[in-house]
Amino acid sequence: MAVRDVYEDSFTLRDARERYFAANGFGADGGYSLAWVPINVGPLTFKIPNTPSRKRAVRYHDLHHTLTGYRTDFRGECEIGAWEIASGCADHHAAWFLNLSTIGTGLLFMPGGVWRAFVRGRHSGNLYRAMFDDALLDRRLGDVRRELRLDGPAPASLTADVLAFAGWSVAGLALFAAQVALSPLVLPLMALRSRFAGAKA
């Protein structure tokens, strides 16, 4: 059974996010102002560009961590990626891409955890369609959890869940294979750009 972080229902989303930033060493702004952000894949760490599309999506993604309890370690990111894909990422293109990548990776190392998170997402909602403003951040976690159907026991899977999971799994594994095939070209270029950006700062 995966261990989850616990943020009390009485916390506001703002308070929970501050604790989440502090617990994970993300800094006061969560790293949103960084040009490049570190990504951990098992023992490997590399950086990806912090594009406007990613910055827009990660504000919600971080709140989702506090609402669901999924951690920011390798397992937790694979789980929350599956949960967000299943519950839908609306028009957040960076979220679709990054989450689909984690599904492909997670299926190779923790298929059971990815499956359970996916089913949970199929039976709950998320914040990707919500207005991101002070009113949202001032809401209580307990209220938002109830609204998104995150306050109950794990749902039973349906045939439609199995079919959806099969389809997204094929897509995730295909994306993972493409990333592995391109990594000898892409990763050195990203490392070079990251060092160049650091030298200019």
Image (spheres, rainbow, N blue to C red):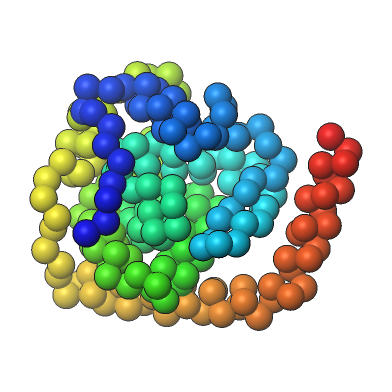
Q: Residue 153, image x and y in percent?
A: 11, 50
Question: Foreground residue, 145 or 114?
Answer: 114
Q: Residue 12, image x and y in percent?
A: 31, 22
Left or right for 27, reference 192: left
The N terminus lies in quadrant: bottom left
Q: Residue at point 58% right, 53% down?
A: 39
Q: Residue at point 67% right, 53% down?
A: 47
Q: Residue at point 15% right, 67% down?
A: 157
In the displayed structure, would residue 192 be above or below residue 168?
above
Q: Residue 19, image x and y in percent?
A: 40, 27
Question: Foreground residue, 45 or 83?
Answer: 45
Tell me if residue 131 can be seen: no
Q: Residue furthest front?
A: 43
Left or right for 172, reference 70: right
Q: Residue 41, image x and y in percent?
A: 54, 61
Tell me if residue 8 can be seen: yes
Tell me the quarter of the picture where residue 161 sits: bottom left
Tell me the quarter of the picture where residue 201 sits: top right
In the displayed structure, would residue 124 be above or below residue 109?
above
Q: Residue at point 52% right, 58% down?
A: 98
In the displayed structure, would residue 171 be above or below residue 116?
below
